[in-house]
Amino acid sequence: MIELPEAITISRQISETLTGKTVTDVFQATNPSKFTFFSGNLDAYKSLLVGKKICSSKGMGIFVDIYFDKDICLSISDGVKLKYGNNTSFIPPKYQLLLTFDDETFLSFTVTMYGGIFAFQGQLDNIYHTKSFESISPLSSQFTQNYFIQRLQKEKDNLSLKAFLATEQRFPGIGNGVLQDILFRAALNPRQKLASLINVEKEQLYKSIKFVLSDMLAKGGRDTETDLFGKNGGYQTILSKNTYKQPCPVCKGELKKESYMGGAIYYCPNCQPVK
Ligand SMILES: [Zn+2]
């Protein structure tokens, strides 16, 4: 799933690699899925995109937007995997959309569970997209400790840390993936309630959000995700499906994987006890 470090990494790669390329053709799904969402009529994607040139790209929250000339945009939400290549034999067999370019390269979009691929002219009418692009990014200088603690104090006391950080788009781009290492580094449990946090823990949490997201971005995203070229990110996750069978890197105790609020959580019961 694309979260903030991947959204920014992939958009940078698109800007660097795809700028100036013109779309020559658009191919619809080889394996249509009802959990892939499009904007308007999919048949119109061809006339919207063919002949248009890529100008730039921007990643925010859980979206990557690709900007073309003539005010055309293709916006990708979390859950969509992009893959760029220069040899058509590497096109994934089960794609939801495929673009080809004037230099015989391609960009494919595949979806494992659900995802959105929206082509449009002008503005996209999608609340998640608006929130992703209008909210203050946790990586921006406007995301200060004061701002974060004020956000925290507005919430209900019985909200858990996972619910606070990763639901309702309070912090677009912080999802159930990056959340795990943020909480580990802050020594806080995903189930812990906001009311139980003391001031020093709130500060630790803020610092951990800044540190972990910056580190993930600097390393080109997480090792559980792939970039534009199908390569895993260089950030080694501490807590993820890749690591939970290994001992805790701090106390060497056993890590836990549990299902909580519609997704797996990973934690060390020793280093992150529920208070
Ligand atoms: Zn531990």
Image (cartoon, helix red, strand yellow):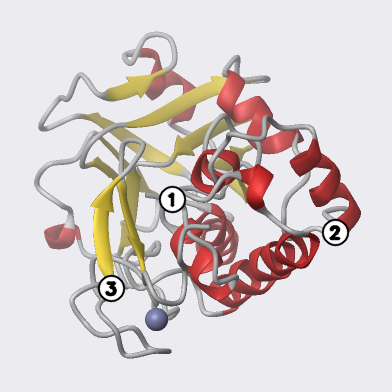
Query: Quick one: 49 or 184, which is closer to the camera?
Result: 184
Residue 149 location, x and y as percent? 82, 50
Label 2 – label 1 distance at C-alpha: 25 Å
Query: Quick one: 239 or 204, which is closer to the camera?
Result: 204
Q: Could you say which disc has been placed on residue 57 in the image? A: none
Residue 202 location, x and y as percent? 74, 59
* Beta carbon at label 3 within 8 Å of ligand 1: yes
Q: Can residue 166 be seen in this view?
A: yes
10 Å neighbourhood of mark 1: few (<14), some, or many (≥20)? many
- In terms of secondary structure, where does tag 3 sit? loop
The label nearer to you, 3 versus 1, is 3
The residue under label 2 is: 145
10 Å neighbourhood of mark 2: few (<14), some, or many (≥20)? some
The residue under label 1 is: 2
Check the image and report above or below for 250 versus 153: below
Residue 160 location, x and y as percent? 53, 42
Residue type, mark 3 in image: Leu
Q: Could you say which disc has been placed on residue 255 in the image? A: 3
User: Which badge, 3 or 1, comes first in the chain's sequence?
Assistant: 1
Residue ID at (49%, 70%): 184
Instruction: Give the number of callouts.
Output: 3
Residue type, mark 1 in image: Ile
- In terms of secondary structure, where does tag 2 sit? helix
Query: Quick one: 148 or 13, which is closer to the camera?
Result: 148
10 Å neighbourhood of mark 3: few (<14), some, or many (≥20)? some
Q: Can residue 107 be seen in this view?
A: no
Residue type, mark 2 in image: Gln
Q: Which quadrant of the view contains residue 99?
A: top left
The label nearer to you, 2 versus 1, is 2
For ligand 1, give the image quadrant.
bottom left
